[in-house]
Image (cartoon, rainbow, N blue to C red):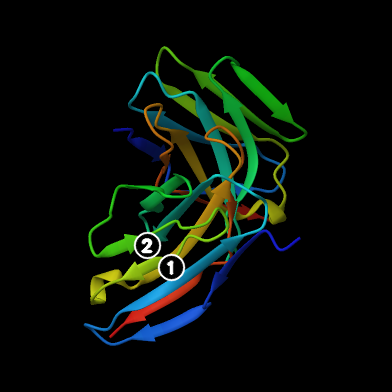
Amino acid sequence: GENVEQHPSTLSVQEGDSAVIKCTYSDSASNYFPWYKQELGKRPQLIIDIRSNVGEKKDQRIAVTLNKTAKHFSLHITETQPEDSAVYFCAATDPSSYKLIFGSGTRLLVRP
Amino acid sequence: NAGVTQTPKFQVLKTGQSMTLQCAQDMNHEYMSWYRQDPGMGLRLIHYSVGAGITDQGEVPNGYNVSRSTTEDFPLRLLSAAPSQTSVYFCASSYSRRTEAFFGQGTRLTVV
């Protein structure tokens, strides 16, 4: 089945800097890659997603890139703000079932 | 529009007790899942369902049962609680296998 690895586990950046979180997946047939943000004590919420027929997607300060050949995808946050501090999860859909498999999460701290 | 509703929010069980975590969604979503969240391990899939009457196992199904008698409800049963089942449990639903998953507010379960 699908396996998703996420790095780094923690990331600390200065406000205004960029942050990059990377994930790799195991099943080359996977075709949907969402990113979720979870604030302390809250539920995970989708911030951006990408499908396998697209290489890059942007939404204001957030972008996701997908490299199908290397089986990895990345989240890029530019001009970070303190409210970006949270845990971020990547995920991939197992193409043979509905299973949405998550990475282990990255705790992002944006220092004012 | 309530979205995904989980009950209870908090629960303490003694080892060996059984209980049911409730999950209901009002978005007419076919896909529903249960995850557990442990520190440093991300969100791990317990069981999932692709429609009423259809359920399947996720990554960590042992010790848990599910059923899906209606589109709206997807309860998770702990048959004989163990301390290793202490965790935060999230229910999620989505319209399809490649669209946003909406999460409930979570249930914090402690087994003593």
In depth, the one of A75 and B47 nearer the eye is B47
Residue at 33% in and 33% down? A2
- The amino acid sitting under disc 2 is Asp
Describe residue B7's horizontal placement relative to residue B3 as left or right. Answer: left
Image location of residue B14, percent across then percent down:
28, 87
- In percent of width and height, residue A56 lies at 63, 20
Q: Quadrant of residue A17?
A: top right
B35 left or right of A108 in image: left
> Depth check: B20 or A68 in front?
B20
Q: Residues within 10 Å of mark 2 (few under 14, many from 20)?
A: some
**Which amino acid is tagged 1?**
Val
* SS for callout 1: strand
Q: Position of residue B44 (x, y in %)?
A: 37, 52
**Chain to which the residue tagged by mark 2 belongs:** B
Q: Quadrant of residue A30?
A: top left
Identity of the residue drawn at 45% across and 15% down: A68
Q: CA distance from mark 1 to mark 2?
A: 7 Å
State whether discs 1 and 2 lie on one chain: yes
Q: Residue at x 35, y 69 (%)?
A: B77
Q: Which residue is mark 2?
A: B38
Q: Is residue A30 left or right of residue A78?
A: left
Circle nearer the N terminus (1, 2)? 2
Task: Answer above or below: position of A59 versus A69.
Answer: below
Identify the chain of the residue marked 1, using the numbered disc in the image.
B
Badge 2 element: loop
| Numbered mark located on residue B88 in the image | 1
